[in-house]
Amino acid sequence: MAEIRLVEVTKRFGSNTAVDRINLTAQEKEFLVLVGPSGCGKTTTLRMIAGLEETTEGEVYIGNRMVNNVPPKDRDIAMVFQNYALYPHMSVYKNLAFGLKQRKFPRSEINLRVTEVAHMLGIKELLKRKPKELSGGQRQRVAMGRAIVRKPEVFLFDEPLSNLDAKLRVQMRGELGKLHRQLETTIVYVTHDQIEAMTLADRIVVMHNGIIMQSGAPMDVYNNPKNLFVAGFIGSPAMNFFDVRITAEKGTLRVNGDNFQLTIPAGLQDRFLQAKDRELVLGIRPEHIYDRSIKGSFAGGEPLKATVEVVEPIGSQVILLASCGSENLTACVDPQTRAKPNAAIEFLVDTNHLHLFDKQTEKAY
Amino acid sequence: MWIKDRHMWMVFVLPGVLLLVLVLGWPAITSILYSFESGRAGEAGYTLANYKGLFKDPFFKTTFWNTVVFVSFSVASHMILGLAVAMVLHSALPAKPLFRVIALLPWVVPDVVAGIIWKWMYDPIYGALNDLLITIGIVDNPIEWLSNPKLAMTSAILVNLWRGFPFVMLILLAGLQAIPRHLYEAAAIDGAPKLQQFIHITLPGLKKMIVVALALDIVWEVRRFGLIQAMTQGGPGVLTEVLSTYTYKQYFKFFRFEYASAISVVMTIVLLLVSLPYIWMISQEE
């Protein structure tokens, strides 16, 4: 078992900075997920941990060892690639055994470990097949098996589920979580899919333009995004943003938008008071907006008038796309809603869950 | 319209087929027929005399073995040099496009031109090669590259190596580029050193390309004519005489059309046998 530590790590490709002085620690046995849009530097970061990419500046530690000049094979890591990278001309058995064979394990030990892993992943019947005779999900399992069979200190996953269809992805996601509990090793996992990040991670690290925007437990990042980018990236459908200003009147704070006014509850007043007189962005998650016409669903909150534009029923809830003055908003409401396109609607906003960001610095208050 | 839509393809294919029949089919069939004629005036009917003659002809035997030597060394050296250059060009090399073009140049030079150029390069009196070797002090006296019986075939093969490797290089370079980079990365993490990566990833990944290059190169080198004709015309004696130059001599110098035709038929059969693995592999694909 080992922890991974990146200290002031920078990677430049020519004049382009892919990763910019990041500091990051994956604790022992932690499932750490690097998440961000494509080009944010997450895969480059992973490849630097693997040793497939040299760092331009900074230090990478695995355990207590600085590994900057250690080749990939000696870092005691295993990596699962996005497109699996199975050796195409070798059988599944040989794919699994290759790493052990290169490390001169005795044949009996190789056989034992391959059988064990094949059993664990349910690919025993496939051992004689070639990769091209396998389905996507089976290939995925073999790729994971190839990593597990070596019993490394650290697992690195590079978007391992992105080539699978939606249903299989959900299934494999569950198995990955189970696998982590079974193996108890440090995992660094890269994905652009925030649902994968939220469900799998002990801790998620949101990256953007080569910089770490926020790291923390998934729900913590979700509930308390530190800046506009994280607020907009984590959560689906994405958070609604409105340009607002704050006014104080007889001791009560109000947010004033283009077409609405909300009173800030007592619990948030102290925090939001500092934002007075600044240009601000108000964030409201779609699930904190309710259809007022549905009886007994939500009491309290503040009203917000809007015009419904699109109604998207997805079964468990209905997503409403509406316009409020010059701004658009998304609301996830109860399926009982009778909202119709082009009709006026009155929402209730749960003001205990308002987020406020500075328009210039994009930081949260 | 009197042609149905689903038969229309025949109309489009017809000109091509006619052209092929005219320039390939007709001469091929004619020479096969020729090879069974005796060639003596007044003798009608078909005979196996030409083929029997071939087996008794000591020159044919020498020529045949010369061809085997010429082709096998040419092809083997093309493969080795081609793969080596392809791997260098595939690696992170500065000014890659420039080197790629340079490596391709020998292939752009026509056969006969290459033969004439090297005939002059090899020339004991005026040749650049001997001049170079003497200037840097490797030899004292000029080497008779093409007229020394011990050196003639080797010299011819060396020129053919220079002229022919770029084709193999090009095919194998394409093959190398098709091998996913991730496989090498996975192998590096699995602990495989470069040599093991070459054995377990590069070679299996290139297998098909190697077979293609082998088959095509063998066929082409067996037919190679201009190079040798321009450089040695089969000499000294018959030491560099190959099937193509021998056929040419029989046909255009001695006007033994029937005998020359028999040689080409034998050549064709041998080539067909050699390219069977290639044909088999292609048919496996589909």
Image: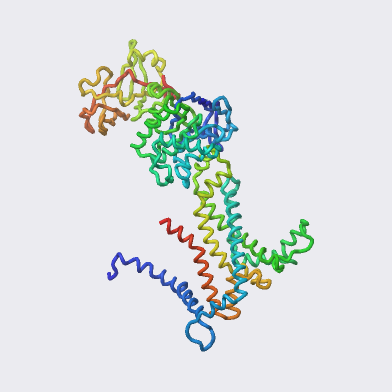
Between A123 and B123, the residue placed more toward the observer is: A123
Report the coloring of the rendering.
rainbow
Rendered residue at 76%/64% (across/down): B142
The single residue placed furthest to the top in the displayed view is A250
Between A82 and A136, the residue placed more toward the observer is: A136
The single residue placed furthest to the bottom in the displayed view is B42
A357 displayed left or right of B170: left
How many numbered discs sit on the rendered protein? Answer: 0
**Image location (x, y in percent) of residue B244:** 58, 71
Quadrant where the image shows the N terminus of chain B: bottom left
**Image location (x, y in percent) of residue A357:** 40, 22
**Residue B40's image quarter?**
bottom right
Quadrant where the image shows the C terminus of chain B: bottom left
B119 displayed left or right of A296: right
Is B264 located above or below residue A189 in the figure?
below
**Image location (x, y in percent) of residue B253:** 60, 79
Rendered residue at 60%/70% (across/down): B242
Between B167 and B222, the residue placed more toward the observer is: B222
**Residue A83's image quarter?**
top left
The single residue placed furthest to the front in the displayed view is A108
**Image location (x, y in percent) of residue B152:** 68, 66
A292 displayed left or right of B101: left
**Residue A56's image quarter?**
top right
Is B74 located above or below residue A353 in the figure?
below
Is A304 located above or below residue B156 in the figure?
above
Between A330 and B273, the residue placed more toward the observer is: B273
Is A27 located above or below residue B23 in the figure?
above
